[in-house]
Image (tube, rainbow, N blue to C red):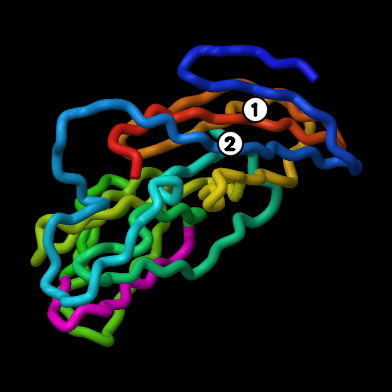
Amino acid sequence: MSRIAIPFLLLITLSTGQGTDPGRVTGHVKLKPTKSAAMPSPTYPGRTVNLAAPPTIPEIKNVVVYIKDAPVHGALPTKTAEMRQTHEMFVPHTLAITRGSRVEFPNDDPFYHNVFSLSSAANFNLGRYANGKSNHWDFTKSGIVKVYCNIHSHMSATILVFDHPNFAIPEMDGSFDLPNLAPGDYTVVGWHERVGERSTRVHVDAGKATDVLLSLPVEDVR
C-alpha cells in the first residue's frame, strides 16, 4: 500500500478490493477544525420561536463528495427528496440530487414559511403556506441552488443538482462509497459551503476500489 501527500490537505491511499468490473471510489472525509472569528451561520440559527430545542446538524452532513463531470450511461435516475422546515431551519441543510428530481418542502412549524431561490440553476418562489402543508419544485438544471425563506431571513440551505448519480453525503463516521464506475481516471471532489471544493485525480481499475481520505479545513466545526 502506498501513501502520497498532495496539496489542499488531501491524503490519497490506494487499495485493491475484490470483485469484477466496474470499480469504485470509497473512503472517508475528515473535518479539520480551523480558527476563525465568531460569525453567525445559517446552519446554526441564533433564535427560534419554538420551545423545543432545534435539531443539531452534524457538520459532516453538510459535505458532498462527488465525481466531477462523470459520464452517464443510459437514463439519469431521479427521485423525490425532502427538505423540511423545522424550528425555523431547513432540514437537511445540504441536499444532493440528480437533475430532474423533485424536492418536497413540508412545513413543520406552527407559522407560515415561504420557500424561494434566485439561483441560476433554479429560480422559484413557492409562496406562503402554513403548518402541515407542503410544496415542491422540480429541478431541471444542474448547479448549486441556494434556498431561503422569504419570511425568516436567517433560514438558508443548499441543494446540489448533478448531471450524474456519482455523488454521496458521508455517513456520520465520514465514510462514503461511489460505486459503479467504469475503469479510468477521475477527479474526486469534496465540497462544503464554507470551504468550496477540494479535489484530486484518481485512477479506478476494473474490480478494484480506490480508497480516498479527504481532509477539509472547516471553520468552527461542531
Question: What residue does disc 1 label?
Answer: 186
Q: Quadrant of the N terminus?
A: top right
Toward the viewer: 7 or 135? 7
Q: Quadrant of the C terminus?
A: top left
Q: Is residue 168 visible?
A: no
Q: Are marks 1 and 2 in contact (CB under 8 Å)?
A: yes
109 drawn magenta: yes
For the magenta stretch, what is the residue range?
100-113
Q: Say left or right for 120 vs 102.
A: left
Return the disc, 1 or 2, that comes first in the chain's sequence: 2
- Which residue does the image show at 77% across and 37% down from the upper left? 182
Q: Position of residue 169 (x, y in %)?
A: 51, 49
Quarter occupied by residue 195: top left
Q: Residues within 10 Å of mark 2 (few under 14, many from 20)?
A: many
Which of the numbered marks, if any, corresponds to residue 58? none
Number of dots carrying numbers: 2
Question: What residue does disc 2 label?
Answer: 67
Single out the residue that lies furthest toward the bottom: 132
Q: Alpha carbon of mark 1 to alpha carbon of mark 2: how far?
A: 7 Å
Q: Say left or right for 171 vs 148.
A: right
Q: Position of residue 100 (x, y in %)?
A: 48, 60
